[in-house]
Amino acid sequence: MEEIKECGIIKKINSNERYFTGTGCRAFFSLVNTIENIYKDSDFERIMFIDDFDISSNFLIKKIENIPDKFYIINIQKIQNNISSNNRATFEKSYCDIGFIKTDRLKLALELGEVLNTINKFYKRFQIDISAKIIKDENMAEKWLCDTIENMLKSENIAYELKDTMGDETVEVEFSFKKNNRAFIKNAYINISSEKIMFSITGGFENILSEILNSSEKKEKFNF
C-alpha cells in the first residue's frame, strides 16, 4: 500500500484515469496471489475448465463426477455495459474466485465455520467492514442449518439480516460492504445445500481492489 501511495496510483484513480499500469497492475496480481494462497493453505485444489461448462450452476444440484472434494477456480466473466445502446456496447471482464466443497451432514458445520472465518479474516486484513444477509427457502426443512449460520455470524461479530424466498432447498449468505458511506457493494457469498458448499471470498476482485485503492473522494467507478 505504501508503494502504491508513493507512486501516485490513488491520485491517478481519483482523477478518473481508467486503467492500471505499473504498480497498479502489480497490486492486482498481488491480490490474485493472496486469494490463491488462501485456498491452497486450506487444501483446495486449483482446477481449470477448457470449455464453457457452467460448474457454478450445476455444482449444488447435480452430481458431477471426477472432481476433488475441495477445489477452486478463478472465473473470468465478461460483462456487457450500455446494453440499451446497440452501437456503443462495451464489455468488461470480472475476475471472481469460487471455492467448492463436497461434504456431508456431519462435517457441514465444521466446513462452513472455516469458510466464514476465512472470509471474515480476509476483510479484516484490509479493514473493510462487511455485513451479511441470509437468504433461505421459507419452506426449507433443514432449519438447523439457518440456526447454525446465525450462530456462526454472531461469533464472528458480523451483522446480518434474514430474508425468506421460494428457493430450492439451499441457503445463501450474501456479504456486502458500504462504499463511500452510500451504496452497498455485494462481494463474498456462500451457497449451501445439505452436502455441498459453494462460495467466493471476493465476489469479484475489482470491487475489493477498488475499495482498497480508492479514496473517499472517488466519484466514478474504476474499471479494469
Image (cartoon, rainbow, N blue to C red):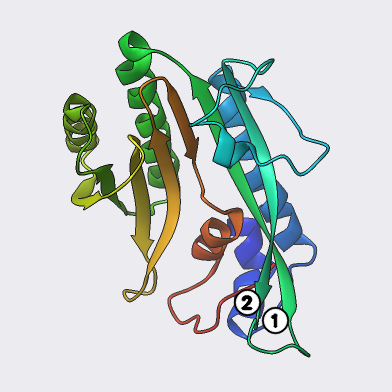
**Residue beneath label 1, please?**
17
Residue lying farthest to the top in this orientation: 106
Q: Please, what is the three-letter code of the amino acid marked with disc 2?
A: Ile
Local crowd size for mark 1, using a 10 Å CA cut-off: few (<14), some (14–19), many (≥20): few
Q: Quadrant of the N terminus?
A: bottom right
Query: Taking 204 as reference, is 62 above or below it?
Result: above
* Left or right of 56, for residue 191: left
Depth check: give the residue in front, 161 or 135.
135
Residue 71 rendering spot, x and y as whole percentages: 61, 24
* Numbered marks: total: 2
Q: Residue at x 60, y 60 (%)?
A: 206
Amino acid type, label 1: Glu
Q: Residue at point 48% right, 37% down? A: 199
What residue occupies the far right of the structure in this picture?
A: 50
In front of the other: 120 or 59: 59
Identify the element where label 2 is drawn.
helix
- Do callouts 1 and 2 mark residues in contact (Cβ within 8 Å)? yes
Label disc, if present, on residue 98 of the rendered structure: none
Q: Is residue 81 above or below residue 203?
A: below
Q: Decide if residue 8 is in sight here.
A: no
Task: Characterize the local packing of mark 2: few (<14), some (14-19) or many (20 or more) Cα atoms within 10 angstroms.
Answer: many
Residue hosting label 2:
13
When the figure is inspected, residue 163 is found, relative to residue 214, above or below; the finding is above
